[in-house]
Amino acid sequence: MPKLIIDDIPVEVPDGTTVLEAAQSVDIPIPHFCWHPALGKAGACRVCAVKLLDGPVKGVQMSCMLPAMDGMVVSTTDDEAVAMRKSVIEWLMINHPHDCPVCDEGGECQLQDFTIAGGHGIRRYDGRKRTYRNQYLGEFIEHEMNRCIQCYRCTRFYQEYAGGTDFGAMGRAAIVYFGRQDDGPLESPFSGNLVDICPTGVFTDKTARFRARYWDYDMAPSVCPHCSLGCNTVPMARYRELLKTTARRNDSVNGWFICDKGRFSNAGVNAPERPRQALVGGKPVSLAEALDALATLLGEFLELHGPESLAIVGSPRMDLAGNIMAARLREMLGAGTLCLFNETDRAELTGKAVSLLTTENSSSQEDMRNADLIALEGCDLLDEAPMMALAVRQAWRSGARVYMVGTQNEIQSAMAPPFTKGGPGGILQQDQTANPPQSPLGPRGSFVKGGHNREATALPFAFEQVASLADVPLAEAKRPVIICGASRTGLESIGEILSDSTASFDKGGLQPALKLAFILDGPNAFGCAELARRHHGVALSTALADGRIKGIISFEADLSHDLPQGITVLGAADWRPTGLMTRAGVVLPTTTWVEQEGIFVNNEGRAQRFKKVMNPGLPIKGLTPELHPPRVHGIDAPGGDVAPSARLIAMLMQRLGETMAVEPLSGPWETLKDLDATGAGVMIHKGEQE
Amino acid sequence: MNTSDLLIARFHGAATMDSTILFKHNRPGRAVTFDEYLANGGFKALRKALAGMSPNDVQQAVIDSGLRGRGGAGFPTGRKWSFVPRNLPGPRYLICNSDEMEPGTYKDRVLLEHNPHLLVEGMALTSFALGVERAFIFIRRGYEQAALNLRNAIAEAHKAGFLGNAICGSGFCLELDVHLSAGRYICGEETALMNALEGIRANPRAKPPFPAVKGLWGQPTVVNNVETLANIPAIIANGPTWFKALAATPEGSGTKLFCVSGHVRDPICLELPIGTPLGEIIDTHCGGMRPGSSFKACIPGGASTPYFTKEHWAVAMDFDPVAKAGSRLGTGGVVVFDQTTCMVAATLNLVRFFARESCGWCTPCREGLPFVRHTLERIEAGRGEASDIDILKEHVHKLNYAFCALAPGAMGPVEGLLRLFEDEVREHITGGKCPLGKH
C-alpha cells in the first residue's frame, strides 16, 4: 500500500495503482485521452503529465504510466506539467477541425472539455490541416477521421479487448488512420462501444446523429432487456423518442461495455405500430375505461367458468413487480393458474437452473473475466448472451483455458454469427418471422439483408473441444467457471458434477471455487423462476394441457400464435404488438422499460433496478400537424395513456374489490424496495428472502 | 555512394592489421568466405568457450572487457546481459538489431557485406552465455546482400557444426533466423523491433517491463547491435584485458567502426581504436576535406546527435568524451559539412526524416515533429519570425517527454542548431532569406 502526496493531499492506494488513479481517488482530475480503466495504460497521448517534486522518481512524468510509490510528492499544478499538458492540446489542435458546433460529439467530447479547460485559444501553427477520407462502416457507426487525435483507444478496444480483426490502425507518423481495409460494416458484435470510448467525435452513433445535444437528453440508469445478462445501460431519449443507448459501468456485470444488440435495438420503443391505445372490442377507449371493461369481463367469466378456469400469464421479459402483481392477482382471485413461462420445457429447465445457483456459486461476468478455466456447454454465446463471449475473452487473454463441450456440429452452430448486419445500403429492420415465438422480446431487432461472414463473427477466443463436461479438468483450476445454456443435457451433467464435487471435495477433490452461469431466456427469467417456485406457477402449455383453462389474461407475454381457439383472451397487456392482441377482448398498452421504473433479476440472480428515462407517448418527430404543436391540451401526451403492467394489475385489483393498497415489493421482496439503481445490484437466491 | 566503394576497407595509421577485430578478415570487394574465416582463426572463440568456459565465464569476460553497445546508446553490454533472470522457465531469446536506419550510418552494412561469419560466431557465443536456443537477426529491408551473406553463413555454420544441435560436441544448441524487416526507422527501437518480429504493429512498448525480463513473446530477450555482437569473439579469444587495450584512451575499450560521409575527400567506413580524436578521423583517415571545402560542422554519431564544430576537433570519439562535449557518439556515423552548408537546411532535412519516420504512437512525436519541420521550413524560406526560435526551443525541451527515444533524438540536431548556430538562424529571420542562398 504505497503512500504518496498529491497536491498536498496524502493518499494511500493499493499496489499497482497508477498515479493517475491515485489522484482520481481523491477527486483530483488529471486530463487523459488514451488511458481508459478497461483498456489500461498506453502512454500515447501524453496529456496526463504531472511533476514529481520528490521521491523515487523526479521530474515531469506521465501519471497513467507511473505506478504510485512510497514517498512520491506529486504536483498536478506545477508550471512545467501544466505547460506540457498545454502543449499536448496545442499539438492535437494542429489538425483537429474546428467543427464543434456541427459535431455530434459536441457537449460530450473529452477533447472539447480538456481543450477549453487548458485554455488553448491561440493557434501558432499556420500550416494546413491534415485531412482524411472517411469510411462507410455500416448503418450504425459514422466515421469522421479528421477529428481523430490518435489515442488508439478504438483499436485497443476493437482488436485487443473484443478480438475484432477487420478494424485497426494503419499508416504511420502524422497520417495514422483508424479504419478498415475497405469500406464496409464493422463485423464485431461489440463495435458500438467505439462510440462510447472515442474521446472525440470520430465514431458517433449514426442512428441518433444530429438529434440532440448531451444536455438535451432524458437519461437515467437502466438495464438492458435484450437478453438475460442484465448489462447496465444509459438510454438517452428526447421528445419521447429513445435515441440511443450507451453502456453504464458495472464492474460486477458488464464492466464498461455492452453489445451491439443492446445498443442498437431502440426502434421498438419508438415504433409507430406499438400499442399505445387501450381497446375494448377493438374500439379505442381510455385506459381507465379499458380496466373497467376488463373487470366486468373478468367478473362474468369467473361467474360462468369459475376461478379454476382462468390463467394469469406473466413473462420473463416483464419486470419483477409486474410478475409479482400477476401472482397477487391470482391469489386474490382464489384459484386459477399462474403462468410465467409459456413452454413446459422452458419453465422446467429455467427452474432447475435457478435451483442449482446459490449466492456463492453463481458466476458474474466479473467472475468469468477473472476465471482461469471456463467450460462452455450447450450455449451459443454470441446469440444468447454476447457480453459473456466478451467476458470469456478477457479470461482467455489472461491465460485461462477454455473448453467447449459438444460434437463438431454443435460447436459449429455455436460459432454462427449472432445476427447479420446490413451490407452496404442495408438497413435496420425488425424481422418478425425470423424470431422463434419463445424469444423473450420476439423480434430482437435483427439486422437482416446482406450476407454474413462466419469467420468474422466466430467466438473471440480459442477453445479446446471435449466430448463431455467430465473431460474438462475442473479440478486443476483455481477459479473455474461453467457456462451452460438452460438445456437438458447441460443441466444433467452439471447436476452430476455438483453431486460428485460435494463427494470428492470431502476427499480433497474439486474446490468449492467452482462457479456456474446459465444463459436464461429473458431479462427477468430468474425472477420468474423464483416467483414460479414460490407461487406454484406452471408453464402455460402445461396448464392448457388438461383442458381446465378456458380463459387467460396476459401481461407482456409472447404467446404462441396457435393458442387453442377455445381459449378466451380476456385481456392482453403489452407494449409490443403480439399476435395475441387481435384476439384480446381488452387491449392494455403498457410502458417499455425506459418509460417506467422496475427491477430485472438477471441470469445470476442479481436484482437490478432500472429507472424511468422518458415519458411515454408518441415521439414528437413524426406527429401529424393536427397533433403538434398541440392545440388541444390533455393530461397525457398523445399515445401517453399507458401504464406499467404492475400498476395496471393493481388498478384492476381495486376494481375487483381489493381495498388495500397493493405494494409489489412487500413481504419477501421488501428488501428490494431500497435497491439502488446505480449500485452493483442484490443477489436474491432462494431462501435469502425467506 | 556506390557500395563497392564502401567495401574497400582501408586501415590507416594507428589501426594496424593486428589491432583490428571487425575488419581483420576483410577481403577487398567481396565477403570473406567461410573457409577463409575458419583458416584465419574463425570460430576459435566459440570452440574455446564451449570447451572450457561456463556461460557465466563468457558473460564475465564481456563485463570485464568494458564493451559498450555499438547501436548508439552505449549501454554496457555485459550489464545488459546480466539483467536476464536466470531461473525463469521457458525460452529466452537473442535478437541482433541490424535495422540500421540512422541517417549517416552504414557500418553494419559494410561489416555484414564483408564478414557475416563474425556475427554468427558472436551470436553463438552470446546465446551460449545467455542460455538462448533461438536467436533472430532482424535486418533492414534494403540490406539484401547482407541478408544473403548471413543466410549463406548460417547454412555453412550449420554444416560445420557451429549451429544446430550439440554444437562442437557440447550440449549447446542454437538456431539462427534471419528476418527481413518490412522497413521503418522505428523498428530499430528494440521494443518496436520485437513487435515487428511478432508480426504486430511496430510501435514501441512501455518499459518496464524491460526486454531482458519480458521481451519477445513475453520471454526474456536481449537485443544487441551487429557491431556489438561481432566484438564478442575477439573478447573471448583474446581476453578482456587485450580488448580494453585496443582503445585509443585508457578509459575506452576496443575499437569502433566509424562511417564517414559528407564533404570529406574520402568518405569511408573504417575501424579505429575507440577514442580516436574527431580531427584525426577526418584529416588522417579520410584525407581531410574535399578540395575547396573547409570544415564547418559535423554530425558525430548519426542523425540524432547534436552537431560538432571546429571547437570539437580534438574530442576523443568515445561515449563519455563526446557526451561531455554536448553530443553523443551514437552509431559512429560521422557526416561532415563544409562552409557552403546551411545549418537550418541541414537540420530541416534531418527533421523531415524523423517526422516521416515517427511511428505515430505518441502526440509529441507525431504532432510535434511536423510542427518543428514546419517552423524550420518557414525559417529556411525566409518567412520566419523571432517567436519561431521560442517554438523550436520549446520543442527541444518538451519532446523529451515523448514515449520513446525517437523524438528526443530527432531534437538532437535542433538543439545543436540553436546552441551552436543561433546567429545563423537569426540571420535567416532578420534577412528574410537563407544567407547562404539555398532558397
Image (spheres, coloured by chain):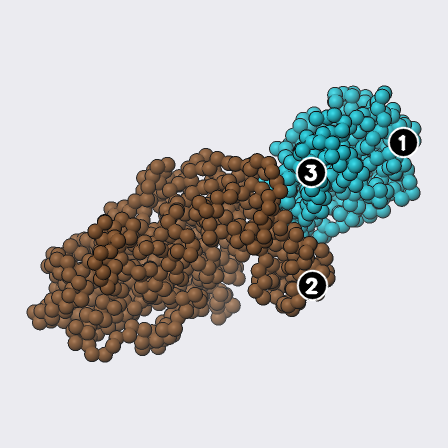
Chain colours: A brown, B cyan
Spatial separation of the CA atoms under disc 2 and disc 3: 40 Å
Residue type, mark 2 in image: Val
Asked if B386 appears above or below A40 in the picture, the reply is above
Q: Is residue B249 visible?
A: yes
- Per the image, label 2 sits on a secondary structure element best described as strand
Circle 3 Cα neighbour tier, 10 Å, few/some/many (<14 / 14–19 / ≥20): some
Q: Residue at image x 51%, y 59%?
A: A370
Residue at the disc numbered 1: B280
* Residue type, label 1: Glu
Q: Secondary structure at mark 1?
A: helix
Chain under numbered label 1: B
Residue A20 to residue A134: above or below: below
Q: Which mark is first along the chain, 1 or 3?
A: 1
Q: Residue at x 43, y 65 (%)?
A: A678
Tally of numbered tags = 3
Q: Which is nearer the eye, A584 or A49?
A: A49
The three-letter code of the residue at mark 3 reads Glu
Label 1 to label 2: alpha-carbon separation: 49 Å
Which residue is disc 3 drawn over? B385
